[in-house]
Amino acid sequence: MNSILAPFSIGSLELSNRVLMAPMTRNMSPGNVPTDNVVEYYRQRAAGGVGLIITEGTCVGHKSASGYPDVPLIAGEEALAGWKKVVDAVHAEGGKIAPQLWHVGGIRRPGVEPGGDTPGYSPSGMAFPGKVTGHAMTKQDIDEVVESFVQAAVDAERIGFDAIEIHGAHGYLLDQFFWPGTNHRDDEYGGSLENRSRFACEIVRGIRAKVAADFPIIFRFSQWKQQDYTAKLAESPDELKAFLQPLVDAGVDIFHCSTRRFWEPEFEGSDLNLAGWTKQLTGKPTITVGSVSLNADFLPEPGDQAFKDGEIASLDNLIQRLDAQEFDLVAVGRALIANPDWAHKVRDNALAEMTPFNKKMLAAL
């Protein structure tokens, strides 16, 4: 287990090991403010040995950012004060923490707070290919959302977070720009892959210009979408490089490569997974994720929000890949809900003592 327990550093971020907590929406922040229960939830994972916690998605301060009830904001004095308590508790346990900055885009339905009757905002008014259900963003809308991400990152650094992650995956707003199925624009934000990536790159560049030069920016992306598990932004390594390079140039430090099953190869002719290809093509550190230490992926059908149960599975394949430096960091999701001390159990070679994940565990933090 030496490779997963080895320290890692980039910029100002120094981690005691390669174990990350994956972002998982919990809907446990009434009024969109983290509670003392949220503080304790993250504190326990830091005490349990996680090197870096990436929080649940935190909605940036734009009127259409939120799409689900009781999701915390990363905007406004009250929410930021709640997150400051989380940060301080994690740091007191020797852990590090980064918020995931989130805008759900066209997924939003009017009525979710905050935002009231505001419709979903997306590149072409679509949450699903071919079906207009919301508001197609203007250039002014795009500029406002970029600024909301930049402000969230500035606030996160100010209250003591150790890095930030931008949510560009899973069919939410940034991914709706990336994906031709939901981006039918004919301006500079649509058409070519370069144009479809422009919005995300503006967010990254805006953040890079306003935070410290050594403050890490993590970018999470995925091929699959919650609307379509078979969707792909890149069908080949060359296409993947064309997608990633502008994000590198904009200032991304680490790529979080979201897959449903980390062990699956991304392209024919190679065993490399998405994180492996991304590291090889960009030279940037990468995070692998997807059913780590469990025997079942997390969502049974497209659009289903109920995480699946999973029995504890071997880490042998994961460790072999980490030993081979296919990727640098490992994000753990459901297994960390079931086992706050997952990292310590790995350290102590106590995998047999781990508790399987049961979706009933989601009823409470």
Image (cartoon, rainbow, N blue to C red):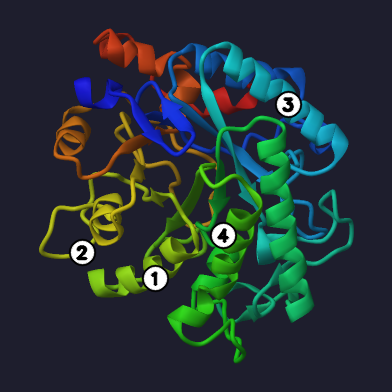
| Residue situated furthest left in the rendering | 269
Q: x, y percentage for residue 308?
A: 45, 37
- Judge depth for marks 1 and 2 and give the one in front: 1
- Judge depth for marks 2 and 4 and give the one in front: 4
The label on residue 204 is 4
Which quadrant would the C terminus be assigned to in this image? top right
Callout 3 secondary element: helix
Q: x, y percentage for residue 300?
A: 43, 47
Q: CA distance from mark 1 to mark 2?
A: 15 Å
Q: CA distance from mark 2 to mark 4?
A: 27 Å
Q: Are marks 4 and 1 in contact (CB under 8 Å)?
A: no
Q: Residue type at mark 3?
A: Lys
Decide if residue 178 is on the left or right side of residue 135: left
Of the numbered discs 4 and 1, the one sitting upstream in the chain is: 4
Callout 2 secondary element: loop
Query: Image point 45% across, 46% down: which residue?
Result: 299
Decide if residue 176 is on the left or right side of residue 135: left
Q: Residue type at mark 1?
A: Phe
Q: Residue 41 versus residue 309: which sits nearer the camera? A: 41
Query: What residue is disc 3 on?
Result: 84
Query: Image point 75% across, 18% down: which residue?
Result: 36
Query: What residue is disc 2 on?
Result: 267
Q: Residue type at mark 4?
A: Val
Query: Image point 56% across, 60% down: which residue?
Result: 204
Callout 4 secondary element: helix
Q: Are marks 3 and 2 in contact (CB under 8 Å)?
A: no
Q: CA distance from mark 4 to mark 1?
A: 14 Å
Disc 3 packing (10 Å; few <14; some 14–19; many ≥20): some
Q: x, y percentage for residue 224?
A: 41, 61
Of the numbered discs 2 and 4, the one sitting upstream in the chain is: 4
The label on residue 243 is 1
